[in-house]
Amino acid sequence: MVQYTGTVLDASFAALSDATRRGVLEQLGRADASITDLAAKFHMTLTGMKKHVGVLEQAGLVTTEKVGRVRNCKLGPRGLEDEAAWIERYRQRWAARFDELDKLVEELKQKEKADGRKKR
């Protein structure tokens, strides 16, 4: 079983829990951008965008570099492989549970059908 550092997953999921931050990641997936550009795109203040970018940076999902007075943002070196693996593990568990439930429902339908024939 894969072991995950709780703090890494916590930081990632906390960062991804906000729609604006997910949007920033999508935007940076297309092209690098300055905080000013991101703030304009998301119709927010520079301070607000700096906070969002800070959360993403803390989670390792974004890196920033200051060039003169401009802070440029790009996707970080860390992908979401650990998070995807964690989600997949639980997706498989739920899929197995639903498969078992489907089998049970089918068995009950067959039993109900058989009982109905016996009463006639």
Image (cartoon, rainbow, N blue to C red):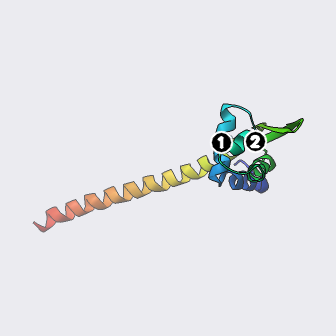
Residue 70, visible in the rendered structure: yes
Looking at the image, is mark 2 or mark 1 earlier in the sequence?
A: 2
Residue 41: x and y in percent read 65, 42
As drawn, is 13 to the left or to the right of 60?
left
What residue sits right under mark 2 in the picture? 36
Examine the image and state in which quarter residue 71 appears: top right
- Nearest the eye: 96 or 115: 96
Q: State the residue at coordinates (63%, 44%).
A: 23
Q: State the residue at coordinates (61%, 49%).
A: 87
In this view, 20 is above or below 27: below
Residue at the top extreme? 31
- Nearest the eye: 64 or 35: 35
Residue 86, visible in the rendered structure: no
Report the amino acid beneath label 1: Lys
Q: How many marks?
A: 2
What residue sits right under mark 1 in the picture? 41
